[in-house]
Amino acid sequence: MRPRIALLDASHGNPDTPRNFRRELDADLAEFPVTDGTVPATFDFDGVVVSGSRASVYWEEPWIEETRTWLQEALRREIPALGICWGHQILADALGGTVEPMGKYELGYRTVEHDGGELFEGVPDRFTVFTTHSDAVTELPPGGELLAENDYGIHGFRSGTAFGVQAHPEYDPKTAEGVVRGKDLPDERIEAICADITAERYADAQPAKLIFENFGRIVEREHAVAAD
């Protein structure tokens, strides 16, 4: 029986977001467009995945507070959670960490280093992944474990059953180019980054997709423990 995972979709209705996660997660997904104020009514899930967003977690918007509150209860119940980009940041924030603006964009294929751990099992110590963010986790939650970083800062953490990843291993080239072309940045930078979105670069980023398979195993293990 496949695990049941709640996908908290904070993408403001971007159809690429659920499409990408449906491809990468071997699970039955219950999708919730949290930017519309739709959070799950229960916690009857084996795991939770939180997507990226164009919002900032420190904005004072009702849907962000509702999402944070729901996540805090889910984490209290020790439901495994994986946050991607904004999801990584809201998980850190919900657990007592700090998220701040960077004053710059990390955008495009970048190299990240990890220190091991089950979320990164099988992923090379130095790996390629697509990034797009101008906020960052600048202080981990109390007791949080740093898992990955690069010269832009924290790229992965763990706190109990919560895992955060700053980059977007779920992106395909279509999604990556669409996101880049939507940024309010100089044309020269936009074109240079888009020129680097190639089949070869996408192939380089394939090992990072093991994060989703590894998270699936974590969900299955925790579900088995809870059932005992």
Image (cartoon, grey):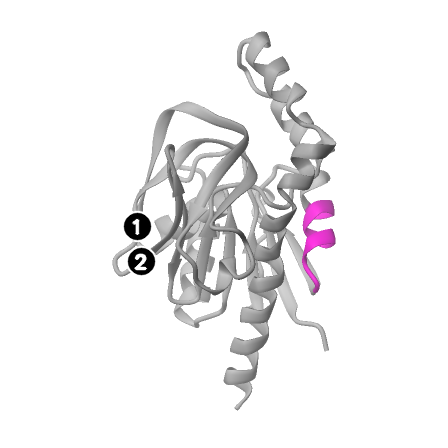
Residue 140 disc label: 1
**Residue at image point 64% right, 24% down:** 196
Q: Amino acid at mark 2?
A: Gly
**Horizontal and vertical percent position of residue 20:** 70, 46
The N terminus appears in which quarter of the rendering? Answer: bottom right
Q: Which segment did they paint magenta?
A: 18-26
> Is residue 204 highlighted in magenta?
no
**Horizontal and vertical percent position of residue 143:** 27, 61
The residue carrying pointer 2 sits among few (fewer than 14), some (14 to 19) or many (20 or more) residues within 10 Å by Cα, namely some
> Is residue 20 highlighted in magenta?
yes
Q: Secondary structure at mark 2?
A: loop
Say left or right for 85 vs 142.
Answer: right
Give the farthest residue toward the bottom.
228
The secondary structure that dominates the magenta segment is helix
Say left or right for 122 vs 171.
Answer: left
Q: Is residue 63 visible?
A: no
**Residue at image point 62% right, 42% down:** 205
**Horizontal and vertical percent position of residue 96:** 29, 53
- The answer to whether mark 2 and mark 1 are in CB contact below 8 A is yes
Q: Amino acid at mark 1?
A: Leu
Residue carrying label 2: 144
**Horizontal and vertical percent position of residue 62:** 46, 43
94 vs 183, nearest the viewer: 183
Q: Secondary structure at mark 1?
A: loop
Say left or right for 130 vs 160.
Answer: right
